[in-house]
Amino acid sequence: MKCINCGTDNKLKDRTANQGRCLKCNHPFAFEPTNMSNIKITDPFFAKAIADISANNTLFFTPKQLLYFLDNRLRSKSFPKFSWLFLYPTFRTS
């Protein structure tokens, strides 16, 4: 996983040996994807989500907006485009 501070690629072995910190700059990692059960979130993914949701780098958003944005990002990565059409049951009117 790449460090969002310096861009160094840190392997799992290196991260665990350094108590979850970057080898080069000692910046702590917020997420460890190997410890997560079903959703894998990495530090670069979260940093990009915050950069995309903030308008003109103001970093102003509500927690509800952040959760909505992350949910959309994770859904788009786990399902192919337009697969949501098949998730909803068809309703028949009589």
Image (spheres, helix red, strand yellow):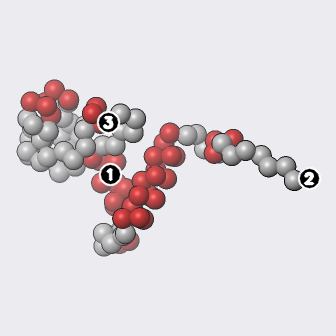
Which of the two labelled residues, at mark 1 and mark 3, occupies the earlier sequence position?
3
**Mark 1: secondary structure:** helix
Which of the two labelled residues, at mark 1 and mark 2, occupies the earlier sequence position?
1
- Contact (Cβ within 8 Å) of mark 2 with mark 3: no
Residue picked out by circle 1: 46
At label 3, the amino acid type is Met
Q: Position of residue 60 (x, y in %)?
A: 33, 72
**Given this view, does label 2 or label 3 mark the residue nearer the observer?**
2
- Image point (91%, 53%), residue name: 94
- Image point (20%, 29%), residue name: 12
- Image point (8%, 35%), residue name: 18
Which of the two labelled residues, at mark 2 and mark 3, occupies the earlier sequence position?
3
Q: Position of residue 32 (x, y in %)?
A: 25, 38
Residue picked out by circle 3: 36
How many numbered marks does the figure carry?
3
How many residues crowd around disc 2 within 10 Å: few (fewer than 14), some, or many (20 or more)? few
Q: Position of residue 78 (x, y in %)?
A: 50, 39
**Given this view, does label 1 or label 3 mark the residue nearer the observer?**
3
At label 1, the amino acid type is Phe
Q: CA distance from mark 1 to mark 3?
A: 14 Å
How many residues crowd around disc 1 within 10 Å: few (fewer than 14), some, or many (20 or more)? some
At label 2, the amino acid type is Ser
**Mark 2: secondary structure:** loop
Above or below, comparing residue 91 to residue 39 in the picture: below
Residue 62 in view here? yes
- Image point (36%, 70%), residue name: 61
**Mark 3: secondary structure:** loop
How many residues crowd around disc 3 within 10 Å: few (fewer than 14), some, or many (20 or more)? few
Q: CA distance from mark 2 to mark 3?
A: 46 Å
Residue 94 badge: 2
